[in-house]
Amino acid sequence: MPAPEQPLSNLEVCPVPPEQRPLEQYRELRDSWFFTWPHASTQGLAVPLLRSWLIVLPLTMLVASGSVPLRHNLPRLVAAGAVAGLVLPLLLLLRQWLGWTNLQRRLLATAVEYEESGWYDGQVWEKPLAWREQDLLVATHDVRPVLARLQQAMAITAALMLLGASLCQAL
């Protein structure tokens, strides 16, 4: 049974299904196990990324050991495996960045795009001023810091990849 529509005023009713409203999508992202990593703190993001790197590291070392030149040069083998292992954390960061960026776009929009029952009946509903103000506050004070943490983490990961690749060449 669909949720009852919440009146904004005596004359206006929100036609957007509750699960498609930007604030509800923010709550879902914030509470999900994956997207909550960058929400709380930088450490909350670093620990799962480090774990993912450590989990994939043995596999990347095994793949790197298949190279004859690397097999005879242990420092290059370790550096190549470590750099290749950074691909998974970078992909995880990219997925999180895409999800949070899409949410920010929806929060900052003046209208909400939604589907009533399927992909073929898309509608657009103009947000009332009170919704716009609330969405702007959430986008500014909650989502923007998350995106800043994600961008910083992606920059650090990319810098580590470049540093590791140049180290591989130097060894």
Image (cartoon, grey):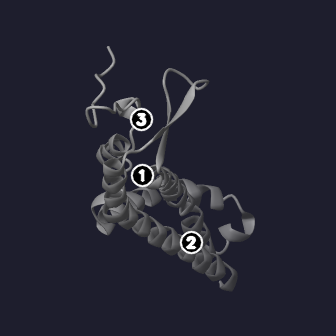
Q: Residue 49, how many percent across, how many down?
A: 41, 60
Residue found at x 28% / y 22%? 4
Kindly state the secondary structure of the residue where label 2 is placed.
helix
What residue is pinned by disc 3?
Answer: 20
Quarter residue 81 falls in: bottom right
Tell me whether circle 2 and circle 1 mark residues in contact (CB < 8 Å). Answer: no
Question: Picture coordinates of residue 133 (x, y %)?
Answer: 33, 56
Which quadrant of the rendered structure holds the C terminus?
A: bottom right
The earlier-in-sequence mark between 2 and 1 is: 1
| Element type at mark 1 | helix
Badge 1: few (under 14), some or many (20 or more) residues near its Cα, within 10 Å? many
Give the residue type that dot 2 points to.
Ala
Closer to the camera: disc 2 or disc 1? 1
Q: Residue at x 54, y 32 (%)?
A: 123
The relative height of residue 5 versus residue 33 in the rendered view (above or below) is above
Picture coordinates of residue 50, whole percent (x, y): 40, 62
Q: How far apart are marks 3 and 2 (CA)?
A: 34 Å
| 21 left or right, relative to 161 | left
| Gap in angstroms between the C-alphas marked 3 and 1 | 11 Å
Left or right, 131 with respect to 73, comes to: left
Front residue of 57/135: it is 135
Tell me which amino acid carries mark 3: Gln
The residue wearing badge 2 is: 158
Q: Horizontally, is 133 left or right of 85 in the view?
A: left
Can you name the residue that lies furthest to the front here? Answer: 11
State which tag comes first along the sequence, 3 or 1. 3
Up-down: is 116 above or below 56?
Answer: above
> In the image, which disc is placed on residue 107?
1
Could you tell me which quadrant the N terminus lies in?
top left
Q: Quadrant of residue 150?
A: bottom left
